Image (cartoon, rainbow, N blue to C red):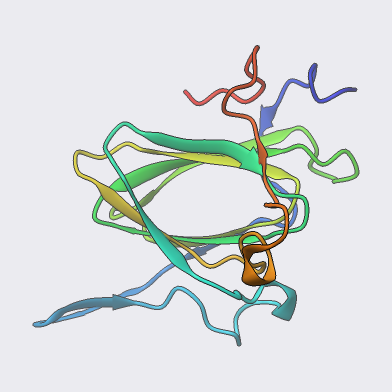
Amino acid sequence: MSEETIQYVDGPIEGVEIRRLKMYSDKRGWLIEIFRNDELAKDRWPVMTYISSTLPGVARGPHEHVDQTDGFGFVGPSDFKLYLWDARPDSPTYGNRHVEVMGESNPAAVWIPPGVVHAYRNVGEVSGLVLNAPNRLYAGEGKKEPVDEIRHEEADPPKFILD
């Protein structure tokens, strides 16, 4: 079955880790641990981090990576609908799709392995922040290598639909 004709079905996706995050609050505010090296396989440890702001109603993706695992932290101040599609023909969950709301109402960290197409949309009323701690450097050492990203946003017809 080719990627163009696959009908994705809802279900878990092999290799995707979703961890519910605990918020530690006090009179100063709150703190959430996104990454601890004693809770994540070494091959997924981040080598860089960045944070992005996404406006309400705006989506990022869908795209996938050949070699990179993304380590997203969704903690607020908005909610995001995360979309995942297993496009790896050799995966036991090939053809599965997973959609979940996370962020302020459901803080979570998600590790998305190579070959899993992913996108997210801000479904809240305010700009939201997303932390990413990938296990590969963007554009490699010194930003001198090709970017490890296969973008599907402009595909015509679209292969991966955000509802």
Q: Is residue 107 above or below residue 39?
A: above
Name the residue located 53 percent from the left edge and 67 percent from the top edge: 133
Name the residue located 81 percent from the left edge and 25 percent from the top edge: 3
Farthest residue in the bottom direction?
A: 38
Number of residue marks: 0
Q: Is residue 82 above or below residue 160?
A: below
Name the residue located 22 percent from the left edge and 76 percent from the top edge: 30
Q: Residue 118: which quarter of the image?
A: top right
Q: Is residue 131 above or below residue 38?
A: above
**Split into 4 quadrants, where in the image is the N terminus?**
top right
Q: Tell me if I can see residue 84 in this picture.
A: no
Q: Position of residue 65 (x, y in %)?
A: 70, 49
Q: Position of residue 139 (x, y in %)?
A: 65, 59
Q: Position of residue 154 (x, y in %)?
A: 59, 23
Q: Position of residue 127 (x, y in %)?
A: 24, 46
* Left or right of residue 27: residue 125: right
* Left or right of residue 129: residue 153: right
Q: Tell me if I can see residue 51 in this picture.
A: yes
Q: Is residue 153 above or below residue 110?
A: above
Q: Residue 95: which quarter of the image?
A: top right
